[in-house]
Image (tube, coloured by chain):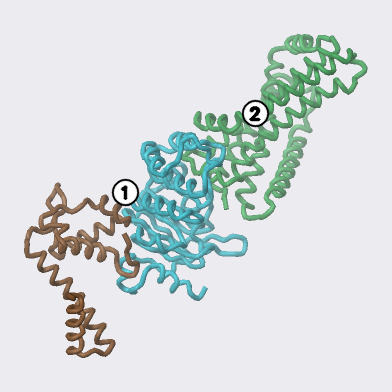
Chain colours: A green, B brown, C cyan
Amino acid sequence: MIKLFKYEFQRKWKVSIGLLLAYFLVYFGFLIKFKSEGSYSIETFGFQLIFFILLGSALSFGSIVGAVNNLRLEAKQSTRDLYFSIPMSAYAKIGSKVIVSVVEVFTAGFIAIYTAVKAIEHLTGVTLWKTAIKEILSQPMDQLIFAVVANIVYAVLMILIVYLSFAIFRSFFSQVKFGGIITIVIYIILNYLLVKGGTVFFGNVEETALEGFALWMMLAGFTAFTTCIYLLIGFLFEKRVSFD
Amino acid sequence: MKFENHIPIYIQIIDLIKRDIVLGICKPGDKLQSVRDYALELKVNPNTVQKAYQEMERMSLAYTKRGIGRFIVEEEAIVKKLKHEMSDDIVHAFIEKMNELGYTSEEILSTVKKMLNGGKK
Amino acid sequence: MIALEVKNLNKRYMFVKALNDFSVTFEKGKITGLLGPNGSGKSTLMRILSGLLQKNSGEIIYDQPLKGKHLKQKVAYMPTESHLYPWMKVSQVIDFYEDFFEGFDRQKVLDAIKVLELSPKSTIKTLSTGQRGRLKVALTIARKAELYLIDEPLNGIDPISRDMILDMLAAEVSDEKCIVISSHLVHEFEKIIDDVIFIRKGRLELKGDVEALRTERQMSIHDLYKEVYKND
């Protein structure tokens, strides 16, 4: 499986470094420009401050596109004949792509948030980052861990729903034209089912009633559900998909 | 190597080797090239060369020395025998073709004589 | 020795039946030519055997049961299209094959690319069709597999590269390997095949030993091909 990671890295590093470089060029370019034009206050949220939030969002969005493309492009181009004939289980292949995608999105997200906050700090003179970190660390440890785990599982699930759309398309609709549109429709349907299922499952539970053990049980259930989705995707890619 | 595709290739390979024997390029007792090497040289499937060699053994033209390789049989008489066989085939085909054109035996003989004498001058 | 048996294979694409109750056996130690016009089912058959396409019904029986990643290791499929990553260098592609395919003969490919006049530093993107065609075959035959499915290796390839490819393939005959090559360019190709399978509209039309067919029908396989498909 490490070889799969080596290959993913080989495939992506140039583009990733390029995007980061472009981001930082724009970032520092505008930071210097804005700084030289004067100072700003957090109360009057001017364009300059919003700019960095938007820039960070663009970076995050780019990483999400990258995460989707990890599987999308692999399953679409003629090179798929090579990738999918590698003698490794589909579970390993999909797993490697999910892990790379999660790392990609979280890293980009962290860079986006950190740099945006720092830019705003720099322009307004208000210490934001340290205050925020202090605030976060002052929370109870178990709540922090819960939040981190829940977020990771949630991000994984979001990526898995995209990948599941591809798997379903390739398993049942591989011969249909305009595959992209069909896949998007499948994705929308899956998301709808997920939200619907979520409200049915969690909607009955009172927020305040959930504490301690019950909350962790729900997280465990959520993780188990996400794992099942992963196994389903693996199964479909192992036994059901067709590359016409 | 230019092979006809409508005649089995293994037969054409045998004919090639027969010609080499008649011309003295291959001598009785000589070792035949390995299947793989010869196949590479002729640009054909090794199985085809293998078939040719096996057929040659069946025709008593070649034999296998276990662990060493395949050899042309060691009889000197083979050269003459093959020469006669091959010339017989050529003449036979020639006579048939001439007959098709309507030549009688006497006419065939005189044509041949004329051609040969013409060549001498 | 039978390498695999295909029984009553069916595959439908939307409204077209690509494979229609197709049955045949493939033998080891030979090169089998799979002949037929475009759309007759050759690629479909190969893609199903390689696991890239799912059959609708039928059986595929190997001499020992093969599934999942073992199947992928033992079946080497070379598609007609360029399946190599355009951004990779030749050396990276070789590393890739070595990483993922057990028993891959690195030295064999390195020797082959010298003969084929390919540089390890070139990117796949920059190679000509002929160079790509040669490289694909060299990589595929360097894999340690039992069934080799070579899909139309000569299509769109220049004559010199075609010769190189045919030479490479002819030299691969071995008792442990079953090599199947599909083509509709019969003329140069028929010298290297032992058996021929004619596939027509998804069905088996004719199967036989090439030399026996030449003797029996007094014609080349090329002419036999024209005979078989003349009314289509």
Please state which of residues A168 and C196 is positioned toward the viewer in this rendering.
Answer: C196
Foreground label between 1 and 2 = 2
Q: CA distance from mark 1 to mark 2?
A: 45 Å
Corner quadrant of residue A28: top right
**Residue found at the far right of this picture:** A44
Q: Position of residue A151 (x, y in %)?
A: 70, 25
Q: Position of residue A181 (x, y in %)?
A: 72, 49
Q: Give percent across and percent down for residue C43.
A: 50, 57
Of helix, strand and loop, which one carries label 1? Answer: loop
Q: Residue at x 62, y 64 (%)?
A: C15
Q: Amino acid at mark 1?
A: Glu
Res A218 visible: no
Image vertical order of residue C132 relative to residue A145, above or below? below
* Protein chain holding label 1: C
Q: Is residue A104 above or below residue A128?
A: below
Q: Nearer the viewer, residue C177 or C66?
A: C177
**Residue at the disc numbered 1:** C176
Direction from residue A143 to residue C229 in the image, left or right = left
Q: Secondary structure at mark 2?
A: helix
Picture residue at 72% right of the left edge, 22% below the top: A24
Residue at 50% x, 76% y: name it. C231
On the image, numbered disc 2 is attached to which residue? A16
Query: Which chain contains the residue that carries disc 2?
Result: A
Three-letter amino acid code at the position of disc 2: Ser
Q: Which mark is residue A176?
A: none
Residue at left offset 37%, top offset 48%: C146
